[in-house]
Amino acid sequence: MSTMSYKGYQARVEFDPDDEIFVGRIAGITDVVGFHGDTVEGLKAAFHEAVDDYVATCAKVGKSPQKPYSGKVMFRISPQVHANAALAAELSGKSLNEWAEEALAEAAARKVA
């Protein structure tokens, strides 16, 4: 699996060995937007076209296109993990938001790279 980026949108790409094509889907939005190509160049062009078509179609129907993520994250963790994270943030001279963003960015970079 690989990823591609265009105009702030990310896509997940896989190779379909049965059809011998690359297949992709825009990630991070609930609307389903897929594309495919039989070469890297074709796949890239299809991805760009899919994003552009998605944005244009949303404009035609009066809908705002979904953006991949807002930057606001809400999740529940155990009180002990919360306390440890808050302490680690304080000891590093950062807010919990700053500390958590760095920790998540480092963890995500290891998975995405």
Image (tube, rainbow, N blue to C red):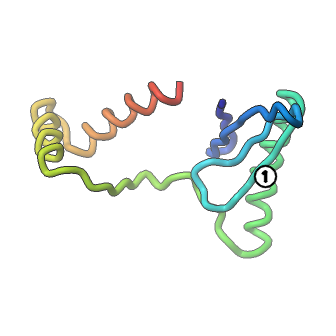
Q: Is residue 18 left or right of residue 2?
A: right
Q: Residue furthest front?
A: 18
Give the residue number, with chain letter if any, for mark 1.
52
Residue pictured at 51% horizontal, 53% vertical: 69
Q: In this view of the protein, which residue sits in the foreground, 80 or 3?
A: 80
Which residue shows up at 32% across the image and 33% down it? Answer: 102
Q: Amino acid at mark 1?
A: Asp
Residue at image point 83% right, 35% down: 43
57 or 21: nearer the viewer = 21
- 107 with respect to 29 (left or right): left
Q: Position of residue 30 (x, y in %)?
A: 61, 61
Q: Position of residue 76 (x, y in %)?
A: 27, 55
The image position of residue 98, as x and y in percent, is 27, 40
Categorize mark 1 by other alpha carbons within 10 Å: few (<14), some (14-19), many (20+): few
Q: Is residue 92 above or below residue 23?
A: above
Q: Is residue 68 left or right of residue 108?
A: right
Task: Work out whether residue 86 or residue 82 is closer to the camera in this orientation and state it.
Answer: 82
Where's the N terminus, which quadrant? top right
Quarter where residue 18 is shown:
top right
Name which quarter of the figure residue 73 lies in: bottom left
Relative placement, left or right, of 91 versus 96 is left
| Residue depicted at 38% across the width and 28% down the height | 106
Q: Is residue 22 above or below residue 95?
A: above
Q: Seen from this angle, which residue lies furthest bottom?
A: 62
The answer to whether 12 is drawn above or below residue 70 in the figure is above
Say which element carries label 1: helix
